[in-house]
Image: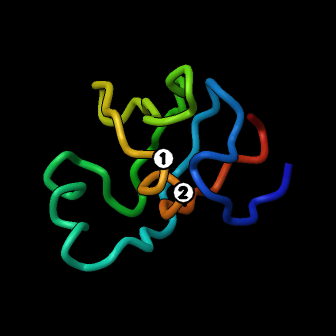
Amino acid sequence: MSTALQPLTSVALGTTATVAEIKLPPEQRPRLMEMGLLVGTAVELVRFAPMGDPVEIKVRGYHLTLRKHEAEQILVKVASGT
């Protein structure tokens, strides 16, 4: 597909993408950085909870759960071959 940036929540389940930008407020970024979610990191969208929130992703070999509104502020680039 294209290499345009899109919110993490808009990629297909099971898709691996690369974090391109984190648009969360500065006071919320350190928590994500401590968990290994940095620009340039590969992430995989694993699943959504039954009501759509939270969102589970796989990053650096472990599963991480984020609030949907946080995941929407993480812009990713999907590789053109996936």
Q: Is residue 76 above or below residue 42?
A: below
Residue depicted at 48% across the width and 60% down the height: 74
Residue depicted at 54% across the width and 32% down the height: 45
Residue 18: percent from the left, percent from the top?
Answer: 52, 51
Q: Secondary structure at mark 1?
A: helix
In the depicted view, which residue is nearer to us: 49 or 1? 49
| Residue 75 placement: quadrant | bottom right
Q: Amino acid at mark 1?
A: Lys
Viewed as shown, does residue 69 lie left or right of 51?
A: left
| Disc 1 and disc 2 in contact, CB within 8 angstroms | yes
Q: Is residue 43 above or below residue 37?
A: above
Question: Residue at the right extreme?
Answer: 1
Question: Residue at the top extreme?
Answer: 50
Q: Is residue 59 above or below residue 30?
A: above
Residue 66: percent from the left, percent from the top?
Answer: 36, 42
Q: Secondary structure at mark 2?
A: loop
Q: Is residue 42 above or below residue 58?
A: below
Q: Specify few, some or many for label 1: CA neighbours under 10 Å numbering under 14, 14-19, or 20 or more.
A: some
Marks 1/2: CA distance? 6 Å
Which quarter shows the C terminus?
top right
Residue depicted at 58% across the width and 36% down the height: 16
Viewed as shown, does residue 82 lie left or right of 14?
A: right
Q: Specify few, some or many for label 2: CA neighbours under 10 Å numbering under 14, 14-19, or 20 or more.
A: some
| Residue 14 placement: quadrant | top right
Question: Mark on residue 27?
Answer: none
Residue 76: percent from the left, percent from the top?
Answer: 57, 57
In the depicted view, which residue is nearer to us: 36 or 31? 31
Residue 65: percent from the left, percent from the top?
Answer: 34, 34
Question: Mark on residue 68?
Answer: 1
Q: Amino acid at mark 2?
A: Glu
Location of mark 2 (residue): 72
